[in-house]
Image (cartoon, grey):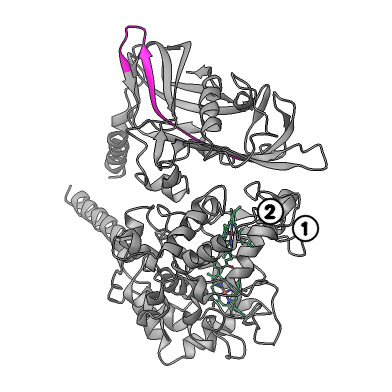
Amino acid sequence: MKKILTIIAVSFAFLACSEDNDDNIIPAPSQVNVSFNFTHNWDNTLINSSNLTTEIVTNEHGEEMSMARIRYLVSRLELTHSNGQTYLFDGYKFTDLSDETTYNFTPENNTIPTGTYTLKFIWGFNETDNVDGAYADLNSASWNWPAMLGGGYHFLQFDGMYNVNTTAPAPFNYHNGTARVSTGVFEQNYAIIDLSTEIVISNNAVIEVKMNIAEFFKNPNTWDLNVLDTPLMPNYTAQKMMQENVSTVFSVGTVTQ
Amino acid sequence: MNGFLKYGVLVLFMATVFNCSDNKTDDGDYVSQPTPAPLNIPQIFSENILDPVIPIDNPQTIEGIALGKKLFFDPLLSGNQTQSCADCHSPQNAFTDNTRFSEGIDGIFGNRNSMPLFNLAWNYDEKFFWDGRVFSLEHQALEPVTNPIEMHNTWEVVVDRLTQHPEYPNMFSNAFGNGPITREKVTKAIAQFERTLISANSKFDRYLLGEAQLTPQELNGFNVFMDEERGDCFHCHGNPNNPLWTDNIFHNNGLDATFSDLGLGEVTGDPADNGKFKSPSLRNLAYSAPYMHDGRFNTLEEVINHYSEGLQNSPTIDPLMKKVDEGGVNLSDQDKADLKAFLLALSDPSFINNPDFQN
């Protein structure tokens, strides 16, 4: 009797596990899953939730500054295979530097063939996606860009203080989104980030995307916070300079697989 | 073999019994299940923001809400049975009170202004109090009952009184099944009632739904609110697409140069958080004076003057506070008056008069 019961129990256990039992004999995969991990630095210093608000950094123009809050949006991440085939991933990625759980991005559909790729994505939302109020999660994060400035969403909210080594530190609000040309006339202000670094994917992979925050103040426009600190949202020239400067902010880091 | 079959049947039977034991009450008596009462989510919320937070282990039910409401208005919860939650959270005042600090049952005043209660299920991070020190509404409700300068009671006494009461034991069984009354059941019921306190029917809500017109003054006030060069209130206090009118996040909005109340800093122990308090919702300001964590401002004029020319610098002041050396952006008198008119359009008379929320 006991024996029979044991057999039943064993076969039950066996049946229950049989679904995921065939991983002994895997051929090299031809289809793999990719995800992205965004990391942040100020030149060579890694910035994360633990040092974001404590790190004192010096920008290209020479002001010492501290960072209170950095949140940003990227969308339409796309990998282009060396054979020309493109893989566009669904969704958008909203990152809050004070919350490390937002650093990762795993698209729902993330299966691609192995091979050599380059990465491309949109800074902010393009015209099609930047629909005022369209995304409940972004609305709940108060990520909206005022209708009087063209509506839609912020691409970047970067708040902090500069001249922190003087007796008169002052705030800056480096916020980027749609540019207002004049009352009621708006200009798209997203950027296409096209990174030429070759990414060799041979297995399931996590692709690191690095953001160098210092670049917002560097290239091609050396940013003088004493002139452009706040308010910048309604300032057309400042908005266009941000769009230019973001082009060197991102790079491909390590690929873990 | 016959014996084996019998055994097998027995095993099967027992498995079934175990599986279904969830549906049975502790002592096996049959008790009718409470009736689900999902929150009625207003259109202005469902169309714009994420769903409210309802804990899996405390679903909204008709019986739970009714019990929570009775408890909320019942002075039995306090030590000498003179004070209910509603004494400091009165429906007429959008569930806060109209004094700067609130008096507990022993005549002692606290050092914080009572908070209005509405749309609490949309506080996604579930950090409650001015300094966010308590997680979840269920846990929050444990605090005032035993707070020595508030209701100054013990949970043993509360549970004992409820158990001896002519009506409560039945209400508890209807809401949570049989078994003893516990503090967890008390706070679950109160939290259910609190989650029903939804306010989404202000003039501005109806304007957004195309059902009301704003005056030119209110419209200009709204523009001041949304304009980074003038009010720039929307980075912390919501916008038409985030109609909670708060971010539920902690900021130092420049009230003081030095802090007698550390706020969030007291909770996290991080000096970088000193002087930070939770941004309150700007709904129902018409009923919730005085304002700020210490109720220092009696009128909206005083609040607006603070942001316009009264800002105090300190190491943790939020960088969204501009021209601090000049006290603020110095709004024109017209913009100030219009901003106030807009703020008042966020008040919702149907909320304070809702018969479901009265004692």
| Residue B42 shown left or right of residue B120 in the figure | left
Q: Position of residue B294 (x, y in %)?
A: 67, 70
Question: Which of these two is toward me, B65 or A5?
Answer: B65
Position of A238 relative to B20 (above/below): above
What's the residue at 36%, 34% (across, down)? A91
Q: Is residue A139 magenta?
A: no
Position of A56 relative to A86 (above/below): below
Q: Position of residue B140 (x, y in %)?
A: 55, 68
Segment colored magenta: A69-86
Q: Label 2, label 1: how many angstroms apart (C-alpha)?
A: 20 Å
> Mark 2 — on which chain does it sit?
B
Q: Which residue is mark 1?
A: B257
Question: Magenta segment, principal secondary structure?
Answer: strand
Mark number displayed over residue B268: 2
Position of B355 relative to B9 (above/below): below
For the N terminus of chain A, the quadrant is top left
Res. B128 in view: no
What's the residue at 62%, 61% (across, down)? B133
Q: Which SS class for mark 1?
A: loop
What's the residue at 63%, 77% (across, down)? B146
Q: Position of residue A35 (x, y in %)?
A: 43, 26
As shown in the figure, which amino acid type bears the numbered disc 1?
Ala
Q: Is residue A73 magenta?
A: yes
